Image (cartoon, rainbow, N blue to C red):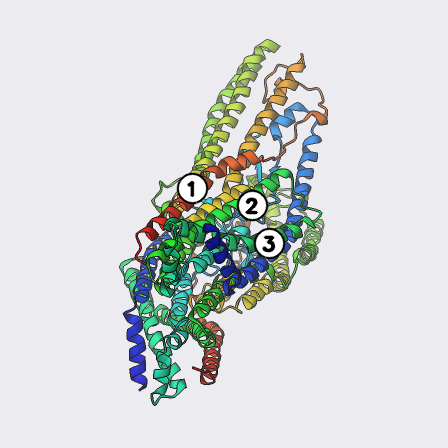
């Protein structure tokens, strides 16, 4: 029996005007998305490889070990995602690289490289009217909530008004099965044009020489497809829920108002509101002032000690082993300075990110926002991706420093004082040995960061579907 | 007969549950967002005041004319909560110095809050009206004719001694009055909320601007009502009409503006143009270097500026193509001072001349690239009434591109005022330009910058084309509906 209802529903939908309109809109949007991405991605990836080559060449041109410590690995770039057509993730706002933080010199003491995070672009010189990119996030969050409503608002109420629902119920079939079969009928009617548009989009993208989908990318695309279906399912179920109780016109109005609030306004306002209520963090001005104050304090204090030591040594002609404590002091100083500055930078970045994450937590009340975050994780763009990039950089920095220590330990003449020129190996290094930064992201990372959101979506869908069954069970026909 | 029709339409909408639900939602959204937006405006105002203090301190810290670091700040627009436009997107701090004429692209941003928060998109009140009221208008209209036809009441109505066109007029006016209610209530609530905050003082001009927005909103809502009415007249069944209405809404309001901006780029890639202009400007500035060398060769000065062969101590900083110099000279350099004064006088006169020359080139290039691009975007987006409405409200408020260009013009005037001030004080030729050993500069005569928004008539002038298009659309839609309705079988 369920198959009969399902088949009838499906044929009804496929013959309807709304199905034709949906197909047209979806294909138009997805094709546009693919074509524009083709042009943009080629530019992005070219700029990225140029930057990386320049930065790597600079690094490989270094021959002395101390210079490696002093200048650090140079600029480290974030690899643009090949899947950014799925979710743009506000990449225009996020920094694309990690730099060496501001360095200082005090007499014959030089600071050593610190991992620093450039400021996020707050405002651009872009004179174009403000707008959002036409990525899959836009297409899915708006269309996959609006169209399910248009398909489901009259699914039960319309049949009730025509009286066919009574006929249907006269058959030996449970009410929840009717709801489920209607749910599946609408879902399949939606997924059909989406699959078509999806495949068209991928086909256009595959024609580009710049984009090659790895097996992991196909897995990501598959997950995106499932997420989109799950999201559409939520709104179909909500539509059925409302349509089980209200008459047709009213259910359209109620559903559209729900849609406007949940999909259009909640993601826009909840974030701002949550930020307003969260604990304020330092502004960039304040942070810079704290950092400068700290650097200056340690520097003045240590410079004084340092020049005193030098004076003491100069008076009685020094032996090499007498110089050692002095050099050790200098080494400890620059390393301490670096560690503290790095900690400050990291703490500040984490405080900023934490504030955004708290706000995002509140935004998750709206499934549209949840889908946005999930797709960002899948496409490897946006805030989570930025965090992973920062983590990659930190891991790499650790490896880089390890490498310096190892090279230094092979030299018997060196004093093994990492951080000062006098205490390190002077032997030339082979450029091939220097580790190079590779910004990689595994599917597992993306999946882990998206897992909670995906569970949340499934939960939303489950709750609303059982709600629809429950509402229909209790409805008068 | 017409008043009866209007009354009947109005009342039937007024008591309907959809009207009630829609009004509640609109008011909730408006109140909620107004509170958020007022809070946000207050924060921006506080930032603006902090920045102004910081800028003033920087001016007062300068001891010589050349070390002056003069920044000006664009004040936040109190009406920007109605329509944000480009207000938050563009930088608000501009540095003014004699050898660069500031353009709109020279504004930069200072960071005060957590910049990652830009990941959250901001909204304004015009967006609420744009989305909610248009949807409401369509919900009122989609069954206005087709519903009556399906229930058969249309036949009864037509049998009355009333022309078909006045029937339509009655329906239209009745529904429009009903649609005005949530709009009026929202505006009232917004004004009440605005009047309770001390940070926003509305001038009479501002009230005129708000009335302008009100008028534009009516024209906009009416377009959507008429679209619904037309669809409802054409469609045979209410269900079809509802579908067509909903799809036209989502295309016109949500999809088309994004699609158009994302896809269309008639200006194309502007990188080549920009870099060629940059090269051209660098060539022009080379003249300064030649002049500098020539001057030094023909005078007792030796070596490179700004130290030449002077002795003493002091601070020299290089930035943005100029030296910021603050020296304390030894007595034996004293005889060179007149030559240095002459040097700065000659060179800065040349620099000011070249700055004007390059400003012209830069301005033209900007016009051809970024501004052209923005205008094209605007034009293409305006094919949708929703975008037309957005641009019209931004024009009323003064946060559109023209409003931002007004500010750029004000900064240029102030730049000229600074140069006039320097000439009046004979700053370029004075010892105080580079040395502070015989007294420091007194900045009390420095012209102050203040930016007044253009008056409301300028705003009206800018909004009128959009408003006119909205009215023409209304007329066309209405006459189209009348034509279709007159020929229709009932």
Element type at marker 2? strand
Chain for disc number 3: A
Q: Where is residue B59 in the image (x, y as percent from the top left)?
A: 46, 50
Per the rendering, the mark at residue B325 is: 2
Q: Which quarter of the rendered picture does the N terminus of chain B lie within? A: bottom left
* Camera-side residue of B239 and A323: B239
* Camera-side residue of A305 and B171: B171
Of the residues tagged 3 and 2, which is closer to the observer?
3
Q: Which quarter of the rendered picture does the C terminus of chain B lie within? A: bottom left
Chain for disc number 1: A
CB of mark 3 within 8 Å of CB of mark 2?
no
Determine which quarter of the picture holds residue B207: bottom left
Q: How far apart are marks 1 and 3 (CA)?
A: 27 Å
* Residue that mark 1 sits on: A456
* Residue that mark 3 sits on: A196
Per the rendering, the mark at residue B187 is: none
Element type at marker 3? helix
Question: Within 10 angstroms of label 3, few (less than 14), some, or many (20 or more) residues?
Answer: some
Question: Within 10 angstroms of label 2, few (less than 14), some, or many (20 or more) residues?
Answer: many
């Amino acid at each position: 029996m369920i198959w009969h209802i399902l088949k009838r529903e499906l044929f009804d939908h496929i013959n309807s005007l709304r199905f034709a309109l949906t197909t047209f809109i979806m294909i138009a949007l997805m094709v546009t998305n693919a074509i524009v991405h083709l042009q943009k991605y080629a530019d992005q990836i070219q700029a990225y490889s140029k930057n990386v080559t320049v930065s790597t060449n600079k690094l490989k041109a270094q021959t002395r070990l101390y210079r490696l410590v002093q200048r650090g690995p140079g600029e480290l770039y974030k690899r643009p995602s090949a899947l950014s057509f799925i979710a743009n993730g506000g990449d225009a706002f996020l920094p694309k690289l990690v730099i060496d933080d501001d360095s200082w010199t005090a007499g014959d003491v030089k600071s050593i490289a610190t991992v620093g995070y450039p400021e996020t672009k707050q405002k651009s010189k872009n004179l174009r009217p403000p707008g959002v990119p036409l990525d899959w996030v836009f297409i899915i969050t708006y269309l996959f909530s609006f169209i399910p409503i248009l398909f489901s608002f009259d699914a039960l109420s319309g049949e009730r008004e025509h009286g066919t629902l009574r006929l249907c119920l006269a058959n030996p079939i449970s009410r929840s099965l009717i709801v489920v079969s209607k749910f599946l009928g609408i879902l399949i009617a939606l997924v059909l044009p989406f699959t078509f548009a999806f495949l068209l989009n991928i086909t256009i993208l595959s024609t580009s020489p710049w984009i090659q989908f790895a097996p992991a990318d196909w897995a990501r695309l598959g997950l995106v497809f499932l997420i989109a279906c799950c999201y559409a399912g939520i709104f179909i179920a909500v539509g059925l829920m409302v349509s089980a109780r209200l008459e047709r016109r009213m259910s359209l109005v109620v559903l559209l108002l729900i849609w406007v609030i949940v999909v259009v306004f909640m993601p826009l306002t909840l974030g701002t509101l949550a930020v307003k209520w969260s604990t304020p963090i330092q502004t960039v001005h304040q942070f810079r002032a704290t950092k400068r104050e700290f650097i200056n304090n340690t520097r003045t204090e240590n410079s004084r000690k340092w020049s005193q030591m030098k004076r003491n040594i100069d008076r009685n002609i020094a032996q090499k082993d007498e110089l050692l404590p002095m050099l050790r002091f200098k080494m400890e100083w620059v390393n301490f300075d670096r560690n503290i500055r790095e900690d400050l930078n990291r703490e500040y970045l984490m405080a900023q990110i934490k504030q955004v994450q708290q706000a995002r937590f509140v935004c998750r009340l709206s499934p549209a926002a949840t889908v946005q975050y999930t797709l960002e994780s899948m496409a490897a763009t946006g805030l989570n991706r930025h965090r992973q990039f920062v983590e990659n950089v930190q891991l790499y920095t650790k490896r880089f420093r390890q490498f310096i220590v190892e090279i230094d330990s092979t030299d018997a003449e060196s004093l093994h004082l990492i951080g000062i020129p006098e205490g390190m190996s002077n032997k030339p290094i082979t450029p091939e040995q220097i580790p190079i930064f590779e910004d990689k992201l595994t599917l597992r990372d993306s999946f882990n960061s998206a897992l909670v959101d995906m569970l949340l979506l499934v939960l939303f869908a489950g709750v609303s579907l059982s709600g629809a069954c429950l509402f229909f069970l209790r409805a008068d026909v | 007969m017409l008043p009866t029709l209007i009354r009947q339409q109005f009342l039937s909408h007024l008591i309907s549950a959809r009207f009630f639900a829609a009004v509640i939602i609109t008011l909730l959204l408006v109140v909620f967002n107004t509170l958020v937006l007022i809070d946000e405006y207050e924060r921006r105002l506080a930032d603006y005041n902090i920045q102004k203090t910081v800028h003033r301190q920087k001016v007062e810290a300068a001891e010589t004319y050349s070390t002056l670091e003069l920044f000006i700040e664009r004040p936040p627009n109190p009406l920007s909560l109605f329509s944000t436009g480009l207000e938050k997107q563009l930088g608000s701090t501009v540095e003014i110095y004699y050898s660069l004429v500031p353009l709109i692209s020279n504004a930069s941003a200072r960071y005060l809050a957590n910049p990652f928060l830009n990941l959250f998109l901001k909204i304004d009140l015009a967006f609420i009206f744009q989305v909610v009221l248009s949807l409401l208008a369509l919900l009122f209209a989609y069954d206005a004719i087709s519903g009556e036809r399906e229930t058969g009441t249309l036949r009864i109505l037509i049998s009355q001694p009333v022309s078909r066109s006045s029937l339509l007029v009655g329906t239209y006016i009745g529904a429009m009055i009903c649609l005005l209610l949530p709009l009026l209530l929202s505006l009232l609530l917004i004004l009440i909320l605005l009047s309770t905050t001390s940070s926003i003082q509305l001038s009479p001009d501002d009230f005129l601007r708000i009335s302008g927005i009100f008028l534009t909103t009516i024209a906009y809502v009416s377009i959507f009502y008429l679209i619904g009415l037309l669809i409802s007249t054409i469609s045979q069944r209410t269900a079809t009409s509802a579908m067509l209405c909903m799809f036209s809404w989502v295309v016109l309001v949500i999809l088309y503006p994004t699609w158009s901006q994302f896809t269309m780029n008639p200006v194309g890639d502007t990188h080549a143009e920009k870099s060629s202009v940059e090269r051209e400007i660098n060539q022009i500035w080379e003249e300064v270097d030649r002049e500098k060398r020539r001057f030094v060769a023909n005078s007792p000065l030796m070596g490179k500026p700004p130290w030449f062969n002077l002795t003493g101590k002091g601070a020299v900083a290089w930035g943005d193509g100029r030296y910021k110099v603050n020296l304390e000279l030894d007595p034996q350099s004293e005889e060179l001072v007149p030559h240095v004064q002459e040097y700065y006088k000659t060179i800065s006169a040349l620099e000011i001349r070249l700055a004007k020359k390059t400003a012209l080139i830069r301005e033209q290039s900007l016009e051809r690239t970024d501004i052209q691009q923005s205008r094209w975007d605007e034009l293409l987006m305006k094919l949708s009434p929703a975008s037309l409405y957005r641009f019209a409200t931004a024009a009323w408020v003064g946060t559109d591109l023209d409003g931002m260009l007004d500010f750029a013009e004000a900064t240029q005037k102030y730049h000229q005022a600074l140069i006039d001030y320097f000439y009046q004080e004979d700053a370029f030729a004075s010892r105080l330009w580079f040395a502070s050993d015989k007294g420091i500069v007194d900045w009390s005569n420095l012209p102050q910058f203040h930016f007044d928004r253009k008056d409301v008539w300028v705003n009206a002038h800018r909004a009128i084309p959009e408003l006119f298009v909205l009215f023409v659309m209304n007329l066309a839609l209405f006459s189209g509906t009348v034509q279709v309705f007159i020929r229709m079988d009932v």
